[in-house]
Amino acid sequence: MGDMVKGNIAVAEAAVRAGIIVYAGYPITPSTEVMEYLSTRMEDLGREFIQAESELAAINMVMGVSACGKRVLTASSGPGISLKQEGISYMAQMEYPAVILNVVRWGNGLGSLDGSQTDYHRETRGGGNGDYRNIILCPSTVQESVDLMYEAFDIAEKYRCIVEVMTDSGLGQMMEPCEYPEFRELTKCDWGLDGTYKVKRGDFLGRNIPGESETYMKKVRAMRENEQRWEMYGEEDAEYIFVAYGMPGRVMSGLVRTMRQQGEKVGILRPITVWPFPEKAFEEMKEKNPNLKGFITVETNGEGQMVDDVALYAKKYGMGTLPVYALPYVCGVPKDDVVAADFAKVKAGEIKEVY
Amino acid sequence: MAKTKKIPNLCNYAMFCAGCGHGVLVRLICECLEELGQEKNVIAAIGVGCSCHLKSGINCDLVQSPHGRAAAVATGIRRAEPDKIVFTYQGDGDAYNIGLAETLNAAYRNENICVFTVNNGNFGMTGGQMAWTTMPGQKTATSPRGRNIELTGIPIKIPELVSYSFKPAYVARGAVTTPAEIKRLKGYIMNAFQAQMNKEGYSLVEVMSTCPTNWGMDPIVAQKRLIEDVIPYYELGEFKKRGE
Amino acid sequence: MRELVFAGFGGQGVLTAGLVVSQIALYKGFNATWMPAYGAAMRGGTANCTVKYGDGPVYNPGQQKPDLVLAMNTPSYKKFVNLVRPGGIILVNADMMTEEGNARSDIQEIKVHCNQLADQVKNPKGANIVMIGAITKILGDFTHDEGVEGMNDMFRKKGKSKFEALNVAAFQAGYEAV
């Protein structure tokens, strides 16, 4: 087992090992350790580190690197990720892959520094203009953050899309032992610009927009089909399935085990991708378990955001009549006893379903 | 005897309006790249607006940047590909209005890129709205009563700002007016590329141009206005010479 | 699963103390997490972190019902004394405690003059290390040697082995004080 490592440092090192040749970013709590660490780490490896004038500039620097087919990372939090949306939309259009780390902090506007899941809607729907999709990976431990960050670059290049690793203050600031993967060789994708104009531009006045859209959507369908990731436990006999990702995801993975020992018929679905949402898990639950009584999301935001997706996919797989509850704890790390007490209220009918 | 110069292979069809200065600048950039043997070693980041037409105007790798962000995109290209020629091609609205932060910060860092801006005193592609470069009293689509500099600021001079405040490698302002000025401008562009090839740092060449379509003028009248009314304010020449 | 909270003023080394204990736990072969108080609280001059360790995975790294709270000063004592689980322990820095204490009868309160002890072993910045020694003895989750070796291992990896003798002395003083 490795030594105690802070989540933000661990993901940064994972990106280094995955072969980023440039990091561009702007400081913002609680993601700043990422760039502080990379400021010297990249230099020591003879790679490039850029403290950009803004998150907006940083994402555009990312675009420049990505256009050359090389691996690049930027990291930020809440309002900083808002500023990056313009570049993300452009990159989606140009099919420039990149990996973005969002260490989510609570709130609207300036918000606060607390760990939270208030960015779920934006990340899963895409915050910029257009019709694009990003793959959103949600680790729940420091080790999983490392593993997903390392793999994120392969996924991004496979689909030529944006992959976001979404953690939060808690996962970024906490320490846990972790093992690092091997160093990858620095690579350049064969489509990357190299100054020779080998990839000719088409006639940009004669664009076939429906055709362009269909080509893109084919890719989106492949992403949706191939990239769903999740972890489930207790789903075969549970009456209530908790759905939680990230920090609440790990909390519920433990609490469900405790509750089952106490005789509660509960299970957990922990989405690892929130886009694509792990709908195949719903298909499995429907097949395996005729005794389901409801779904309960555990989230750290004001009134539940993922709860919308749970209701949609419950409906899609024939479980639309089941109630879907949200237990929202705004920020921080949900406490086991509080969640257990709220579960009792759900069963007693004191907490009403959202859908 | 006048000689006809061979059109550089880099040049493709230009989609600019009649009398517009963009086409001349594109041609000069292509000639310089070719003369420097860099035509197969160049990546551009282009702005939004009339500079988008570079997509058809030049046969080289380029990245369509979001509006104003070309200098940031070029920074990324530069860091990813240290041995390529990297330049931006932008209008004044792109580089000096919406992209002021990215333009100045790239200059501030002395990023080893060339920035070419076409200053025609308005937003061309969107239909002739006021830019920070619009002259006092000039009528545009968003200053139909004439630009009020009390409310909107005085015409912006980025080459002066960059050369006096930062430590760039090379800064100049040229014009696509007379053959003599065009020849001088080509020298500026050459210097900018050579500075980059020598890893001297950031260079900026601003190019004074007409916009006959949006100025609502015949191209010849527009040239007269540019020479008589605009260039006296926007002094031509080198503001920061290489090695200074 | 053990839960410990380390609390004090910024500069008293409570975050480091928590980290050392979590490293000792790893050294022993446990799983462990370390989580700092974060948000506006960390900007106000007080600091605290929560450490959990045990045989299985640590699912919930957050502050819940600590088995032991280290209170390095009076405000930390007041803030955390009611968080300790019934039957748990509050370990108090007697040198920085301006009040009577003994706020609860259902927990054990242990006072250690860790600043004085640190001074006595000529390691005045090692009051937090003194408390690590005390915690090792009080909880008995690791042996004396596991504690010392786990601590030294961590500081060696951080390139700070030149303070090893001083740290061991501080650890020893705390271990013997309880």
Image (tube, rainbow, N blue to C red):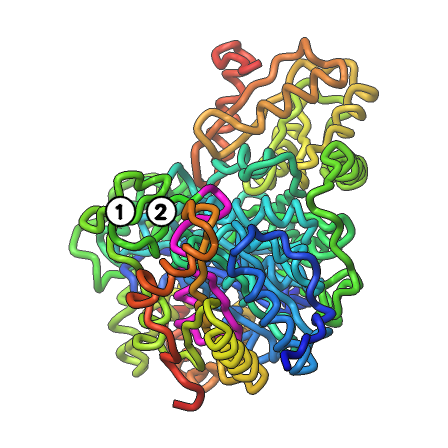
Q: Is residue A295 magenta?
A: no
Give the residues in magenta: B101-127
- C121 relative to B125, above or below: below
- C117 relative to B13, above or below: below
Which of the 4 image quadrants contains residue A324? top right
The mark found on residue B147 in the picture is 1
Residue B137 or C58: which is nearer the viewer?
Answer: B137
Answer yes or no: is residue B53 visible: yes
Real-space Cα separation, disc 2 to disc 1, in angstroms: 8 Å
- A228 relative to A12, above or below: above
> What amino acid type should be assigned to the residue bearing mark 2?
Met
- Mark 2, residues whose alpha carbon is within 10 Å: few (<14), some, or many (≥20)? many
Residue on which disc 2 sits: B130
Helix, strand, or loop for circle 1?
loop
Relative image position of residue B219 (x, y in whole percent): 47, 54
> What amino acid type should be assigned to the residue bearing mark 1?
Arg
**Drawn side of residue A289 relative to residue A132, left or right:** right
Q: Residue at x 42, y 45 (%)?
A: B216
Q: Residue at x 41, y 79 (%)?
A: B168
Relative image position of residue A91 (x, y in whole percent): 63, 50
Residue A223 or A291: which is nearer the viewer?
Answer: A223
Residue A97 or B150: which is nearer the viewer?
Answer: B150
> Are the two marked residues, 2 and 1, in contact with CB atoms closer than 8 angstroms?
yes
Relative image position of residue C81 (x, y in whole percent): 31, 44
Helix, strand, or loop for circle 2?
strand
**Drawn side of residue B226 relative to residue B56, left or right:** left
Q: Residue at x 37, y 39 (%)?
A: B141
- Mark 1, residues whose alpha carbon is within 10 Å: few (<14), some, or many (≥20)? many
* Sooner in the amino-acid sequence: mark 2 or mark 1: 2
Q: Is residue B113 magenta?
A: yes
Q: Residue at x 70, y 57 (%)?
A: A153
Relative image position of residue C78 (x, y in whole percent): 25, 46
